[in-house]
Image (cartoon, rainbow, N blue to C red):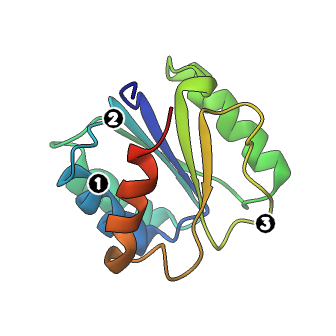
Amino acid sequence: MKPIEVVVMFGVPERQADALIEELLTSWIEPRAWLMFGTDLSLLAALDQYWRPRIDITVALLPGLGELERDVALDVIAMEGHRPDAAVWLHGPISECEGPADVVRASILLDAAEASRLQGTALCESLRRLP
């Protein structure tokens, strides 16, 4: 399996994103960068402040989590110097659209249960099976 260049979280509730980052970092998965797209400025700022000393993280505030914002997120991936086809897109339960499965390496839909720390191990197993 090729290393994961960037993990994108889109529509993953910010409180649960923290737990997922922690879980993925304690596994073998060490992406080069993390991109977090959300709608709550205070929670995004807290994530940035906590994680920035430990990982390469970019947080971006979006007005919503629909198709337009998904397209903006794809542009941000490229502007940050990452290839969208090397990105693993974690598509969360509060998103208002489907993930861009046709342009990213993998698009994984997380339901509310999978977006919790208790299901992080299952996500790690899914990521291990990526080509």
The quadrant in which residue 26 appears is bottom left
Q: Quadrant of the N terminus?
A: top left
Earlier residue among tags 2 and 3: 2
- Reply above or below: 102 against 39: above
The local crowd at label 1, few if under 14, some if 14 to 19, many if 20 or more residues have their Cα within 10 Å, is some
Q: Earlier in the sequence, mark 3 or mark 1?
A: 1
Q: Where does the image place residue 32, in percent across and percent down from the top left?
A: 32, 29
Q: Position of residue 90 (x, y in %)?
A: 55, 54
- With 77 as the anchor, is 15 left or right in this view? left
Q: Secondary structure at mark 1?
A: helix
Cα separation, mark 1 vs mark 2, equals 9 Å
Residue identifier under label 2 = 31
Residue bearing the label numbered 1: 24
- Taking depth in this image into account, of 105 and 22 the one nearest to the observer is 105
Q: Residue at x 59, y 75 (%)?
A: 111
Of labels 3 and 1, the one closer to you: 1
Q: Which residue is mark 3?
A: 96
Q: Residue 73 or 2: which is nearer the viewer? A: 2
